[in-house]
Image (spheres, rainbow, N blue to C red):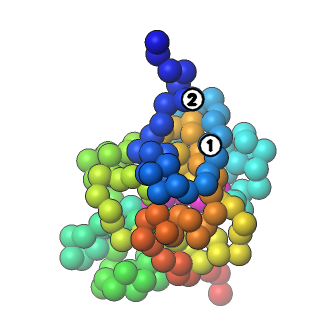
Amino acid sequence: MAKKDKDIKTNAMRILDRNKTKYSVVTYQCDEFTDGVSIAQKLGEPEELMYKTLVTEGKSNEYFVFVIPVAEELDLKKAAKSVGEKSVEMIHVKDINKVTGYIRGGCSPIGMKKNFVTVVDSSAQALDKMIISGGRIGSQIILKPADLISVTGGKFESIIHKEN
């Protein structure tokens, strides 16, 4: 008997289960990439809780994962400094699947092909919960920011672009 689509676990969910991390999943109807602000509106959640996953490549040819609020922009200089790189650049959209195992719009910071250095914007520290991609389009995971850090081995740093 086939499982209903919403019952299918993603890599991210299996890893959270294996680590006995409390989380919940919310789903929404969507067949293609949708920006995080629109997803927050669809779910009726404040956009401040929604975080997007960005993957970069450093001068060292290493990949780095940054998790920032959906309405914000990654500060590449702060991001590079946070991981000890001279500079980092966003990877090309066509490379997301090859590098992470996920697709654009369904890229979770948990459960990528490899465990990349992960940095979550420090704004998440003030939250009781945050919402990240569930590992496929139409699926979001709600969890505590500290649990995301624990599962990814990541750290909090100020990495978003701030207006002066």
User: In this image, 143 relative to 151: left or right?
Assistant: right
Residue carrying label 2 = 6
Span shown in magenta: 50-54
Tell me the residue at 42%/71% (across/down): 153
Instruction: Specify whether residue 51 is painted magenta.
Output: yes
Tell me the residue at 78%/44% (across/down): 44
Decide if residue 19 is in sight here: yes
The answer to whether marks 2 and 1 mark residues whose Cβ atoms lie closer than 8 Å is: yes
- Placement of the C terminus among the 4 image quadrants: bottom right
Q: Which of the 4 quarters of the picture holds residue 132?
A: bottom right
Q: Is residue 161 above or below residue 65?
A: below
User: Where does residue 49 sit, x and y in percent of width and height?
Assistant: 69, 60
**Total marks in image:** 2
Tell me the residue at 71%/69% (across/down): 127
Decide if residue 90 is in sight here: no
User: Where does residue 115 sit, x and y in percent of width and height?
Assistant: 32, 62
Residue carrying label 1 = 25
User: Where does residue 105 sit, x and y in percent of width and height?
Assistant: 49, 44
User: Where does residue 29 sit, x and y in percent of width and height?
Assistant: 63, 29
